[in-house]
Image (tube, grey):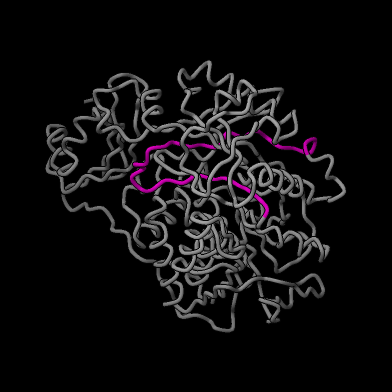
Amino acid sequence: MDISWKSKVARDIIEISVPIHEYHAQEEKLQLFFKSKIRNIQGDLNVIKILKKSLDARKADIKYNLRLELFSGNDWPETISMPDFPPLRKEETVHIIGFGPAGIFAALKCLQLGIKPIVVERGQAVKERRRDVAKLNRSGEMNTESNYCYGEGGAGTFSDGKLYTRSMKRGKIQEILELLVLHGADENILYEAHPHIGTNKLPEIIENLRKTICDNGGEVRFGAKLTDLRIVDQQVKEIAINDQWESCQHVVLATGHSARDIYYLLHENQIALEAKPFAMGFRIEHPQSLINTIQYHNEKNAAILPPAAYSLVTQVAGKGAFSFCMCPGGIIAPAATNNGEVVVNGWSPSKRNGNYANSGWVTEIGEEEWVDFKQHGPLAGLEFQKYIEQKAYKMGGGQFKVPAQNLLDYLEEKQSDALNASSYYPGKTSVDLNLLYPEAINFRLREGLRAITKKLKGFDHQDAVVTAPESRTSAPVRIPRTADLHHTEISNLYPCGEGAGYAGGIISAGLDGVRVVKAIKKIKG
């Protein structure tokens, strides 16, 4: 076992590598196991805390790389605890539009700063939302206000619950992760290199977060949709919720990247928006056992290895083509928000123990792709996105059936006679997906896959299937804001999270929610 040492004030941090079979054999008594390995180097130990854990599968001897913090003598790790929520100054309020990750953590930060958050969410609470999602999967009936994207917790509630972020703000990330643990998430999210919660656990955690907000003086309303704004002297003076007007002091706009009606509302009110690049493509599905074989080449430890993931990227015609939101052991879900449109997305349960692995395969979409929609100004990319989703719905034949093609047939540009098995519930229709996107986009997607299959042997397996479109990787619109985080033209409107174009995932959206509330507090003084 390799051990290296680092110093941290009065405590010690060590980095060790442990063979995967040895780690799992001792998993129920890790403290004793770690102490037995390092007792000759360090004196009596109180406890050993895992700071980081990552899987190294580059060689046949697969191992976990661990960073451990050692506590001895009078030294003990700090326990995580709920933040302080001081009495609210009830005359100070912030309206938060949307109850996804950005809205949730914005509301919690308001409470920490003594400000009352008033959260309005167009969709339903988790329990009601579950029924709406089940109906969509079972019979293709869409509730346009309560689905995979709208409702308590936002799109993240029924997602894989990936918590990985490229943000370097480790301390701030830790605060978000600790709040999730305090509300029911497993403690391993604090140290896993690529943490995730799982769609089976997220709903209860989201409900617990809402309870904390309400128990400490916050307000959360469901079935409450922002329908209009009244702007006077470059400030939002009133907002209409379900067409009923109410006054407001500050408005945090955290509506997610699928709320097209919000973009339309802002545009109609002549509030500045910007088109932004995004990515579109397909979702590819393989048997999970196949991906395990491709990635690990290790039958000996198959029973204890976690379901394998992958991250792929290549360049075609000067633009990137890459995998997105890879879901080991997951399913493909219908993520549209309107009738007459098809959208696919993926998620996994916490154990990632499903039979299939799926991932987006997408390419960059820029101004040259939406040139035929330029009459829509800053909404040109959005209109192109909508056009593709509506075209896909027609190709699928309605009822949210997804247009699909076996991967080998897609690469050979021929329609599949019989489609491979897939986890997508509403059903699938055999089409030639080479006809879905304009040729320049399809060329990058197809040739990118051809390049990848030459490097990753077995990826073009006969059992792989492609569904489309994976079209909502990020917002096609940015809502511009100043260095003080309010809109460039409206001094008390705070665009926030994925829908505003400033985040991409649960953690980054949560961090952005915290940032904008801190900015509001700074202005309030």
Q: Nearer the viewer, residue 34 or 74?
A: 34
State left or right for residue 358 relative to residue 76.
right
| Residue 266 appears in the figure | yes
Q: Residue reaching furthest front?
A: 417
Q: Residue reaching furthest top?
A: 454
Total label count?
A: 0
Q: Vertically, is 112 above or below 246?
A: above
Give the magenta part as a residue range: 340-369
State left or right for residue 520 relative to residue 114.
right
Q: Residue 15 falls in which quadrant of the image?
A: top left
Residue drawn at point x = 69 percent, y = 62 percent: 486
Q: Dividing the image into 4 quarters, which one contains the N terminus? A: top left
| Residue 510 appears in the figure | no
Q: Residue 92 falls in which quadrant of the image?
A: bottom right
Residue drawn at point x = 57 percent, y = 75 percent: 118
State left or right for residue 43 relative to residue 431.
left
The image shows residue 230 at horizontal and vertical percentages of 77, 75
State left or right for residue 12 relative to residue 401.
left
Residue drawn at point x = 41 percent, y = 40 percent: 194
Residue drawn at point x = 32 percent, y = 43 percent: 51
The image shows residue 504 at horizontal and vertical percentages of 57, 47
